[in-house]
Image (cartoon, helix red, strand yellow):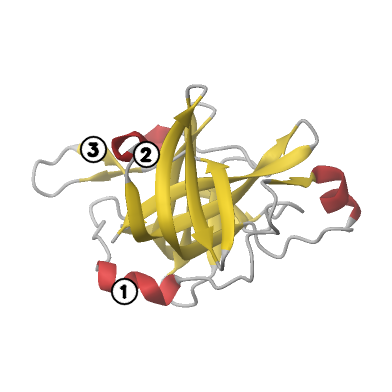
Amino acid sequence: METKELLVLARSKKHGKYCVAGKTIDSKMWIRAVSTPCGAAVGSHSIFYIDKGDNKKYIIYQGQIIKFNFFRPTPLTHQPENWHFDRIVSPQEAPYVNKNNLVSFIDQPASLWGRDNKISYAQIKSGIYKVPQSLYFIKVQNLSVHSQFGKKRVVFTYNNIHYNLPTTFHDAGKYIDKTLESCFLCVSLGEEYNGYCYKLVASIFFI
């Protein structure tokens, strides 16, 4: 069993449960909490904190600093950051990070796994396409949220590359048809679906 203190950078819906990921406070290492070695999402019953003000339970939120217990790392070829999650250690302690400190957690990849919106799962499994990490926390420009065929998509520019990706961020609907000059995003490489791993926006941090 290992205890890790994480800055939660993503808490999005996945198959009726939650995908939770963040970076360790000390080394800035990415960890994605999963409920099984196969990468299943975690249930809401296990990712709550107790507010000291009203003593009620709340689901953890992005931007909070939380201590987690993990059984062990359970990396997958397309998601090497996966750790088998046990429980939250101190649910009464869930402070929010100062937004001015978010910049120290930023990743600076040349691109988000290329320019396309998906990667062949067969190429990942065979080792033709290597995934050193499946999560990025980045600063982007000219972001807008749109609804297309009932699904929300996030359009933005990163390193002069234009992206149009689906999002699982639960508050994305509040910003439909609005444009933001700059903000932080957590972008994830999702699980295999119809032969591909699709890129998605897991969270948006508005500056």
- The answer to whether the residue labelled 3 contacts the one labelled 1, judged by CB atoms less than 8 Å apart, is no
Three-letter code for the amino acid on which mark 3 is drawn: Lys
Within 10 Å of disc 1 (Cα), the crowding (few <14, some 14-19, many 20+) is few
Measuring 53% from the left and 71% from the top, which residue is drawn there? 107
The answer to whether one can see residue 88 in this image is no
Residue 186 in the image, given as x and y percentages of width and height: 48, 55
Q: Earlier in the sequence, mark 2 or mark 1?
A: 1
Question: What residue sits right under mark 3 in the picture?
Answer: 57
Q: Quadrant of residue 90?
A: bottom left
**Comparing labels 3 and 1, the label whose residue is closer to the camera:** 1
| Res. 101 mark | 1
Measuring 82% from the left and 52% from the top, which residue is drawn there? 124
Three-letter code for the amino acid on which mark 1 is drawn: Asn
Measuring 64% from the left and 71% from the top, which residue is drawn there? 110
Residue 55 in the image, given as x and y percentages of width and height: 13, 41
Q: Earlier in the sequence, mark 3 or mark 1?
A: 3
| Res. 178 mark | none
Does dot 3 land on a helix, a strand or a loop? strand
The answer to whether one can see residue 124 in this image is yes
Cα distance between the residues tagged 2 and 1 = 23 Å
Cα distance between the residues tagged 3 and 2 = 23 Å
Q: Nearer the viewer, residue 103 or 175?
A: 175
- Residue 122, above or below 97: above
**Comparing labels 3 and 2, the label whose residue is closer to the camera:** 2
Q: Earlier in the sequence, mark 3 or mark 2?
A: 3
Three-letter code for the amino acid on which mark 2 is drawn: Ala
Does dot 1 land on a helix, a strand or a loop? helix
Question: What residue sits right under mark 2 in the picture?
Answer: 172
Residue 25 in the image, given as x and y percentages of width and height: 41, 72
